[in-house]
Image (tube, grey):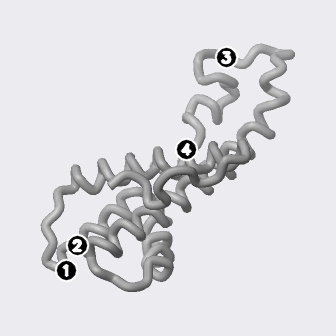
């Protein structure tokens, strides 16, 4: 799921997910800041992926307003990737366009990677190189 950033083992005192936390481990002090940053970054990546999905889908569905569609997809994605996938699948079916779930899932993964790369570049002072809509 796009919104989950921590492995379950990290929620039980395991700093790196590989074993028990060592008392005096410096990673324990850094973890709350790192987790907060990761949560913010994950949210930005997910939001960007939704925008990219909306741009792609509005082109395929011949819709006019990608921003409004992105807002609708964001509401659908509040229940996770399955909600996002269900909404897009339903919209494609309503438009008479057949698309396999595998194709939608592959697109979601590709656009998640594109969104992460865009944000990584923007954090390093190189915003949005390449195509804005991500992979076709």
Q: Which residue is mark 4?
A: 117
Whether residue 7 can be seen here: yes
| Front-most of residues 87 and 45 | 45
Callout 1 secondary element: loop
Which mark sits nearer the N-terminus, 1 or 4?
Answer: 1
Tell me if mark 1 has few (under 14), some (14-19) or many (20+) residues whose alpha carbon lies within 10 angstroms of its own.
Answer: few
Few, some or many C-alpha atoms within 10 Å of disc 3 (few <14, some 14-19, many ≥20)? few
- Regarding mark 3 in the picture, which secondary structure is present there? loop
Measure how far apart labels 4 and 2 are at the Cα level.
27 Å
Tag 3 residue: 20
Numbered disc 4: secondary structure: helix
Q: Residues within 10 Å of mark 2 (few under 14, many from 20)?
A: some
Give coordinates of residue 114: x percent, y percent: 48, 48
Q: Which residue occupies 72% across, 42% down?
A: 124
Of marks 2 and 3, which one's residue comes earlier in the chain?
Answer: 3
* Cβ atoms at labels 1 and 2 below 8 Å apart: yes
User: Pointer 1: what residue?
Assistant: 95
Residue 91 image position (x, y, % from top left): 27, 76
Q: Position of residue 55 (x, y in %)?
A: 41, 69
Tell me, for residue 92, which label it has, or none: 2
Q: Nearer the viewer, mark 3 or mark 4?
A: 4
Are circles 2 and 3 on residues that touch, CB within 8 Å? no
């Amino acid at each position: 799921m796009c919104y989950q950033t921590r492995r379950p083992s990290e929620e039980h005192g395991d700093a790196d997910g590989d074993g028990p936390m060592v008392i005096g481990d410096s990673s324990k002090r850094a973890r709350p800041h790192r987790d907060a940053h990761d949560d913010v970054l994950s949210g930005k990546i997910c939001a960007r992926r939704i925008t990219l999905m909306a741009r792609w889908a509005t082109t395929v569905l011949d819709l006019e307003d990608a921003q409004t569609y992105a807002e609708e997809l964001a509401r659908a994605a509040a229940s996770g990737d399955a909600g996002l996938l269900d909404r897009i699948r339903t919209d494609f079916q309503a438009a008479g366009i057949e698309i396999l779930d595998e194709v939608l899932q592959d697109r979601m993964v590709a656009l998640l990677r594109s969104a992460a790369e865009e944000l990584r570049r923007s954090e390093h002072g190189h915003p949005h190189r390449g195509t804005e809509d991500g992979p076709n």
